[in-house]
Image: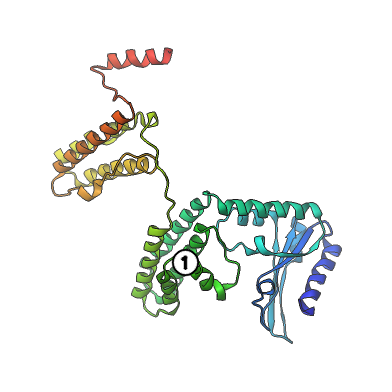
Amino acid sequence: MNQVNQKIIHAVIEKAEKVCPDSLAFIGIYGSVVTGDAYEKSDLDLLILIQDDKGWQLGTGFLLDDSKVGYDLYCTNWNGLRYDAACHHAQISKLMDSKIVYIKNQEAYDEFCKLREQTKRFLESEDRFQRVSELVDKAKISYANAYLHEELGQVRLDAFGVMYFLMDACMLFHGRYFKRGTKRMLEELAALPMEEGFVDHLKGIASSKDVLELRALSKSLLLYAEAHLKQEKEKEEPSESLSGTYEEMYSNWRNKVEEAAEQNNVFASFMNMCNLHDMLEEISSEAAIGTYNIMEEYNPDCLQDNVSLFDTCLQKYEAVYKTAGIAIKHFHSVDEFVADYLSEREK
């Protein structure tokens, strides 16, 4: 580490002793200085961990005219580190790779080491796939914005959003994070077991001058993510936990679909069939109940076909009930239901 960087670190320590002696926990260095990617105009990336609000005054930004290098000294508190440890993004090198060069509070450093181990376990666990899903959803929002905007500059920013979230999603999916700076990001992505075209599309967005091309490339990135960044879950066999779902589908939408057909209400038919589709899709994400392509077969021109489609789905789902050993609750009258309902409560 060069003398300029050493003087900056010593200055932070000295200022902490003067203005907030109980705030500074420790200091670490990360980024190009640690990875070996530094060049003559590289700044210094510091992890300055503070333990109270007084410590924020250790942060600052400045320029050195003799070297024409800019520096920004950021402070980090425990909330920031814990957010990184939860892997909401893949830019967690500050947490994971910082080389600690000064320790004021040993207990804080020990806690920091535990947080690192916790993050390693998270990256190895299936919990990381939830973060991947969240990042893909954010990328979809950026993609939608690319179609809402028309100006080239704004669409470029929207495409950047797609890139940013999906790059993080790819790293976390494979249990990794970015260790190097922006100039090495594509290198790190290319090292993953993924299609070469993904990185090519990232390069394409960076060099594109056309709104339509930016949208097309963003779409390709998202389609890749949809196809490849999914956790294959082993679905449970139908069980007693499905009890009541058949009756719920019937109660919520069956007669409404029939009424929509009688009144030729296309909107109502569409809404109710979509709701049925969503419920079956949600159940099928956890249990092996088969496939229901309701909205593929939905017919806006003949609403009576949708009634038949609904009943076909119910018949198919009734077979799932039988497999799970569940009986559909039928009663000849409300009095029969009341008697049964009250007897169940007394058991």
In this view, the residue farthest toward the right is 18
- Vertical relation: 345 (above or below) 309: above
- Residue 84, position as x, y percentages in the image: 61, 57
Residue 343 visible in image? yes
- Residue 16, position as x, y percentages in the image: 82, 64
Residue 263 visible in image? no
Q: Quadrant of residue 224?
A: bottom left
- Vertical relation: 156 (above or below) 338: below
130 with respect to 103 (left or right): left
Residue at 86% across, 63% down = 17
Disc 1 secondary structure class: helix
In the rendered image, which quarter contains the C terminus?
Answer: top left
Three-letter amino acid code of the residue under disc 1: Gly
Q: Nearer the viewer, residue 316 or 124?
A: 124
Residue at 42% across, 46% down = 233
- Residue 144, position as x, y percentages in the image: 38, 62
Residue under pointer 1: 161
